[in-house]
Image (tube, rainbow, N blue to C red):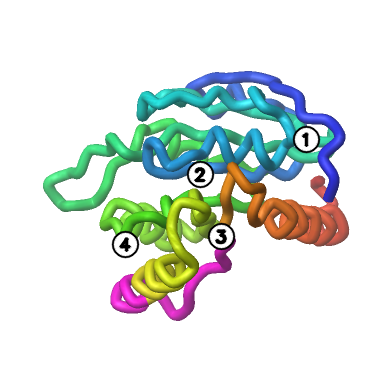
Amino acid sequence: MKINTAEFIVSNSEVDKCPKDFLPEYAFIGRSNVGKSSLINMLTNHKNLAKTSGRPGKTQLINHFKINNNWFLVDLPGYGYAKVSKKTKSVFQQFITDYFETREQLVCAFVLIDIRHEAQNIDIEFMAYMGESEIPFCIVFTKADKISKVKIDSHIAAYKKKMFANNWAEMPQYFVTSATESTGKEDVLNYIEEVNQEVFKNNSEF
């Protein structure tokens, strides 16, 4: 897929104020400071489409960007500051769960994980929430240019092991990316294009 146009549409914290267009949506979410804005800018060929910042938690709203006039890229807040209830179930910002659980246009979420670190419990917990809620998602490992191929493979293997230990039957589809070197760009965009083709062919609502 080639991205020709990427247009900011709206920011808000209420799902019912999201765009009414019935176009496929792909949500990008990850722990704070995972490199989400840089990845979005790399994928869309825009240096400043998503605001980058060294300050974690910069994104605090649901941000919609219309891509090629036929699908939405949705930039969601990080879950790095999530509270954990007494029942040890993670409670994320309410509008994030509202978005995932009520937004009919959502086709797939991309859960971003910093490949430099070993498996983090908060990422495992968030993916468990996605699985329990039956929300389709892929994993996007970011910052692959920062460590060696051997470490990348080792850290991915550690995530697989943890997920299998948490009753996952298989590892979700994943991509290894680097915003600096554009690694994984074609893989992610081609995946979105393939899913879009299936969505438009099989779902009359789109």
Give, as a single range, the part of the protein colored magenta.
161-175
The alpha-carbon separation of the residues under discs 1 and 3 comes to 22 Å
- For residue 188, which quarter of the picture? bottom right
Residue 162: x, y in percent?
Answer: 31, 72
Q: Earlier in the sequence, mark 4 or mark 2?
A: 2
Residue 116: x, y in percent?
Answer: 38, 55
| Residue 119, numbered label | 4
Q: Nearer the viewer, residue 31 or 95?
A: 31
Q: Kindly identify the residue that appears in the image at 27 percent across and 47 percent down.
A: 90
The reply to whether discs 1 and 4 touch (Cβ–Cβ < 8 Å) is no
| Left or right of residue 78: residue 70 | right
Q: Nearer the viewer, residue 178 or 73?
A: 178
Does the magenta segment cover residue 72? no
| Residue 176, numbered label | 3
| Residue 16, numbered label | none
| Left or right of residue 99: residue 167 | left
| Residue 100, numbered label | 2
Q: Which residue is mark 1?
A: 67
Callout 2 environment at 10 Å: few (<14), some (14 to 19), or many (20+)?
many
Circle 2 SS class: helix
Q: Earlier in the sequence, mark 1 or mark 3?
A: 1
Residue 179: x, y in percent?
Answer: 59, 43
Q: Name the amino acid, label 2.
A: Phe
The alpha-carbon separation of the residues under discs 1 and 4 comes to 32 Å
The alpha-carbon separation of the residues under discs 4 and 2 comes to 23 Å
Q: Which is more foreground, mark 1 or mark 4?
A: 4
Q: Kindly identify the residue that appears in the image at 48 percent across and 78 percent down.
A: 170
- For residue 91, which quarter of the picture? top left
Circle 1 SS class: strand
The alpha-carbon separation of the residues under discs 2 and 1 comes to 20 Å
Q: Name the amino acid, label 1.
A: Ile
Circle 3 SS class: strand
